Each structure stands twice: as C-alpha cells, then as structure tokens.
Amino acid sequence: MNDVIALIEQLSRLAITPLLLSLVASATGIVLVRNWRLTLPMLIAQYVLVGLLMARSIQPSLALIKLISGALVSFALSIAAQRADDMRAQRGESIAVERIRMVAWRSVPAQVLLRAVALLLVLTAAFGATTRFPLPGNARELHFAAYVLIACGLFIIATTPEALNIGIGLLMFISGVELGYIAVLPNVGVSVMIGLISLIVGIAIAYLTLADSEPLVL
C-alpha cells in the first residue's frame, strides 16, 4: 500500500498540462462515444487522473480513496452492462460489442459531428467560467478540471436516454464537484463522504442499467 501511495505522490508531481489535457481527452471520449465497452475504460482512466489532481492538494493516501471507489464503481457497472447485453442478445437486440464490430458508418459522422460541436461549446463555457467565475483558492488548474467535468457530465445527462450513460454523466458531475470542493477546502471527511456517495450512486446505476434492459410490458 505504501508503494501505491508513493507512486500516486510521484505521478501527482508531473506537469499539470499533460494531466489536464488527458482529463479533457477522457471527457471528450466519453461525450462522443456512447458504447460502454469504450466509455467505461475511459471512466477508469478519468478516475485515475482525478485522483492525481486531488493528490496535488490533499494527502496521496486520501486521493487513493477516489481511485478505489472509481475502480469499484466501474467494476459494478461493467458487470451490470454485460448482464444487460446478455439479456438483449437473448431477445435478438443489438448489443455493445456488435455495434463496435459492425459500425453504422452512414449515421456515425452526423452523430459525432453534432456531439463534437456541442462539446466544443461546453468546453468553451468551462474555460470561460474558470476565468470569469474562479473558485476560491489558488489552484486554478483544479478549477478548470472541475468545470470541465461538471459541464460534460451535465451535457451527457441531458442528451442521452440510457440509464448507464446518464449514470456515467452523473459520476463525472460528482467528480467535478469533488475537485472543486477540494480546491477550495481540502477535507478528509468530505473526500470519504463523496467516495461513499459515488459507490451508492454506482450501485443504483447498475440496478437501473439492468432494469433498463428489461422488455417493456404493456
């Protein structure tokens, strides 16, 4: 465990620009792609990046809570998503792995282009909020990361009908709120509480993902 904490501390000392660019890239991928086999690995990477950013303001041992809760949530969501795909496959419906292997190239460019344009506006708004409405404290890079996660999370929630994708957007929103709070007032209790909230939300999303895969009975 001490080796993991030491590794987190070393990685958190990396230049802030690569960390922020990687965070924006993960958020961009999750917004543009709506396939859980691709978005869940991006979400795991995002949790790692958020943990490293948090380690710049709080103890690395506390940032480890974010990594553990993120791993547990992603694991639970992957199990639920796979179970939901199995249920859809039994009914002959399209599942995630088939949508990767047999991409509908005619519709993909229009969908991605529309999301990309909206995402550009969202990222511009996040940057503008960082400069015009900065949070208290000196860690402006955390302010930008928080605004990006909050804005992208809300965008996903507002533009997808699927329970799993809505849940992923909600988890991104929670991560953004946590980063913003840590930048203002680093606190052990808040980090633990938000970690527990993420776990509870993850379990609820997993349940709703399974319920969403059930056939409608009229």
Image (cartoon, rainbow, N blue to C red):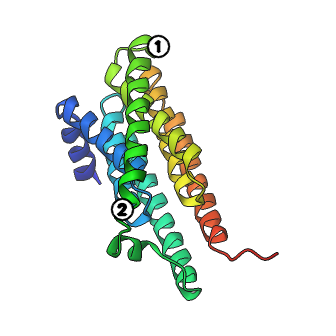
Residue topped by disc 2? 38
Q: Residue 42 appears in which quarter of the rendering? A: bottom left
Q: Is residue 110 left or right of residue 80?
A: left
Q: In this view, does 21 lie to the left or right of 163?
A: left
Q: Is residue 61 visible?
A: no
Mark 1, secondary structure of its residue: loop
Q: What residue type is disc 2 on?
A: Leu
At x 49%, y 34%, the residue is: 150
Q: How far apart are marks 2 and 1 (CA)?
A: 33 Å
Within 10 angstroms of label 2, few (less than 14), some, or many (20 or more) residues?
A: some
- Quadrant of image for the N terminus: bottom left
- Quadrant of image for the C terminus: bottom right
Q: What residue type is disc 1 on?
A: Phe
**In this view of the protein, which residue sits in the foreground, 196 or 29?**
29
Residue topped by disc 1? 133
Residue 188 in the image: state x and y as whole percent: 48, 34
Residue 133 in the image: state x and y as whole percent: 46, 13
Mark 2 or mark 1: name the one nearer the start of the chain: 2
